[in-house]
Image (spheres, rainbow, N blue to C red):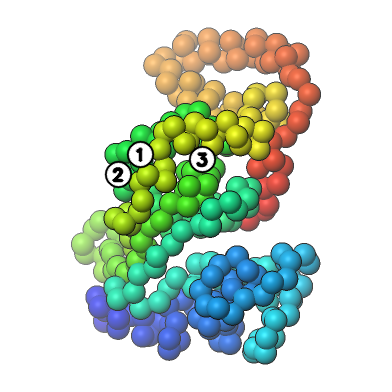
Amino acid sequence: MIKDNPKEMTDSFFPKSFHYIPNNPLKTQRFNEFVLVDTDYVEITHTRDNKDNINQPLFDPKPFSRMFNPTGYTYYDYMKAWSNILYINPEKHSWFVWLKRGITLKFPKWFVKWFYNFGPTPNIFPLDILEVYNYFRDNSTYVPRYKLVSFVASQSITWILAWEYLVIPQFEDENIELKLLTRRIKVRWWKKFNHDLISKAKKIEWLKTNKSKNNPIHKTELNKESLFLLEKQHLMVDLVASTSAEEFFNKEKSIQGTSSQDKSDEGSNQSNSYLRNEDMFD
């Protein structure tokens, strides 16, 4: 019998007090909290470690600063903790989240993915904040995928985060009784946020001050692989838009004719820091 009640389903799927399947039963909610607090990247309690960043191979364990079982954690535990820590009491618990002003804006890819899963989106911004964000997006030189997280982090934007279980059919055909247990993430604007902290004038000044840190993106500064992917995307869109075989082949010839010119125009390749430092975790 297929259960439609998320509570009944999760009681069957997950261990007690868990809202995900742990790879180790000892890696509890408290373990995930301790991982983030102990690295000094997140403030959840007053217990934290003042040591430096994780500086060991990803699977090498790092000992906790206090007694705990397990006695340490790896960088993979650290990455998972950012998501697992949020899964507390669906529908009854919410998080008040912000990124501390002044932190480095060089984020690894896995954190950007986390942000897009759990962070705010422009459609929840009030109009005045949205105007400032649009200016930042159009005038900053961050890699496009990093602009939203860079804006939110640099201005310490605060948001409210909650989640709930959702049971949905896997197929549109009602005769197929296969359903999926999913999580729905909900974010909303914190109404008490001080809008005076963010203004277009302040953002213009901030962009000027941080211009040297933004690593301007020009075509000659992208590494070859990233440039190839960008050009490939543009060319594919152009080819797909062809309405006839003749038009398609004409565009193809035009592309071949300009490829040698593009190669001769390449300057020195100084990669953008985001692209150079992106890790392997998608």
- Structural distance between the alpha carbons of marks 1 and 2: 6 Å
The image shows residue 209, relative to residue 218, as above or below, that is below
Local crowd size for mark 3, using a 10 Å CA cut-off: few (<14), some (14–19), many (≥20): some
Q: Picture coordinates of residue 153 (x, y %)?
A: 51, 50
Q: Mark 3 sits on what residue? A: 147
Quick check: marks 2 and 3 in contact, CB under 8 Å?
A: no
Q: Amino acid at mark 2?
A: Pro
N-term-proximal mark, 3 vs 1: 1
The residue positioned 70% from the left and 11% from the top of the image is 261
Q: Measure the C-alpha gap from mark 3 to mark 1.
A: 13 Å
Look at mark 1 in the image and give the residue it sits on: 130
Looking at the rendered structure, the secondary structure element under dot 3 is helix
Residue under the image location 60 percent in, 34 percent down: 209
Residue at coordinates 55% horizontally, 78% vertically from top-left? 46
For label 2, count other residues whose C-alpha is less than 10 Å away and answer few (under 14), some (14-19) or many (20+). Answer: few
Given the image, on which type of amino acid does mark 1 rest?
Leu
Outermost residue, front side: 196
The residue located at (69%, 72%) in the rendering is 50
